[in-house]
Amino acid sequence: MNRRSFLLRTGAAAATAAAWPAHSFPLSAASSALRLTERSVETRIPLTYTGLSFELAQLSEPEFFSAASTSLIAHCRTLSANGVLRIGGNSSEFCWFQADASTPEPKLHVPSGDLNANWMPHRLFRITPQAVDNLAGFLKATGWRIIYGINFGNNTPERAATEAAYVASKLSGYLEYFQIGNEPDLYRSASNGTRPPGWDFDDYAREWAGFARAILAKVPNAKFAGPDVAGSSDWVTRFGERMTVELPGKIVAVTGHYYASGPPNDPRVTIEHLLRGNPKIADDMKRIEAITQPRGIVYRMTEGNSCYRGGKPGMSDAFASALWAGDYMLELASFGCSGVNFHGGSGAFLSASLGDHTPGMDVAKKPQTMRAGYYTPIRVEPGTPVKAMPIFYGMMMANQLTGGTLLDASLDVNGVNATAYAARVGKTIKIAIFNKDAAQPLDLAIQSPQRIRSASASWRLQASALDATESVTLAGAEVDPQAYWSARTTERLEVNGSSAQIHVPAASGALVLLEI
């Protein structure tokens, strides 16, 4: 199985919007239909659903996450008022915590074999107490919570416990849980080399439990999640079953990663392939939910994006990624996922996390200044303004359904590549529609479970083309360099009793509000 083929693998306040005239067409002319019904089992999308993932090595620059990072803070708050930051990634396995001046630097582990075939960092990253102190200020300023990754690949239980104790003391009001290790299902592979070839889940579970118990000795109220795998469904289910027994009350989530495609220099990785979707997601999530629900834990996708190994230019940094991201986030939510963290950060650290390989540059159509990170939701490169990238807009749109109770959304699209999701928030039904079809528009009749008092297409997600990397808009507006965004346009929709109708052009999205 390819490492990335398996599943585990309020926006800013809106100003008064200018009203567009209603788009009207006879209800009988609608070529597609969306029927909304109540679910037999209530499923709520958590307010903390939307998240970002960064390399733990970013903390080796103590000012990156700090109260002084005002532009990054503003972008996080525009994305979500209740988001979750996850720090981990490949680089976490080479990070070390210098508790005080007497803490020695650990010995650097260099795997045997050809390092050109190895996709891990080949240097150490020092994290100081000041970096953790500053991180607390960043979280306070954003209002976000954090998932903190601990080095498991090249560490000792004693060092891990010392770091966790300091982190817990400084981030106690913001800490969701600890993760120990990043993609341990790949440790034994030549591309990783953190453990020998014969190392398997039982070895992992034994070592992992030793780290967790060492942390609990210093942080008795610590909570954990795992296994944070790249693509092993077997490890996820076995972790949930085994660790909830070995450490009762201490495991709150199972976690994994998902990259929709890759690597970027594979010619089969295209926008068309990305937007086609993955039919395995439904089956994989059902298997995960069968493990989590009886044990009172949840599943979170803690790292992922459109294309692994840094993303593909012209796809991962283009409008197509916005449609993909919004669709993927809400598809997972519809199956009970508790959150999604899309990976990103500065190019230098993303490149370092890949062993300084930058395959995306091999397929760039023009000379690139970024070493990696084409998929990052927020561009954070030294010397350039912080910027919301196209994927950010899809995340913003999906975030509007958080806090809502999901409805079943049965969509008959007659061959159009489109999806739709709905959630009830008070007396409003919010519907996110993604027309991922490059050519066919969607004329959609929406059937509500109750009489509709009024309907509007509050936000349109648009760009000039699927491969457009600039001028992506949501409700007619871009996120400006200060992270300010305000909806400029809204559109009244034709209503008849419990039905409404909307036209969604090819390669675009729409957020519909039904007042009932």
Image: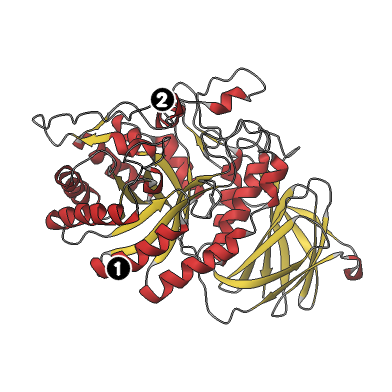
Residue 273: name its quadrant: top right
Q: Position of residue 225 (x, y in %)?
A: 33, 58
Q: Which residue is mark 2?
A: 114
Q: Looking at the image, which is closer to me, 79 or 55?
A: 55
Q: Position of residue 247 (x, y in %)?
A: 23, 66
Q: Is residue 378 above or below residue 498?
A: above
Can you see residue 67?
no
Percent position of residue 132, x then y: 25, 40
What kind of element bears circle 1? helix
Q: Nearer the viewer, residue 185 or 137?
A: 185
State which tag comes first along the sequence, 2 or 1. 2
The color scheme shown is: secondary structure
Which residue is disc 1 drawn over? 244
- Quick check: 302 left or right of 165? right
Whole-percent x, y for residue 332 in the image: 55, 60
**In the depicted structure, whether residue 122 falls above or below residue 425:** above
Q: Residue at horizontal 89%, vertical 63%?
A: 25
Picture residue at 41% right of the left edge, 56% below the top: 255
Q: Amino acid at mark 2?
A: Asp
Q: Which mark is nearer the camera, 2 or 1?
A: 2
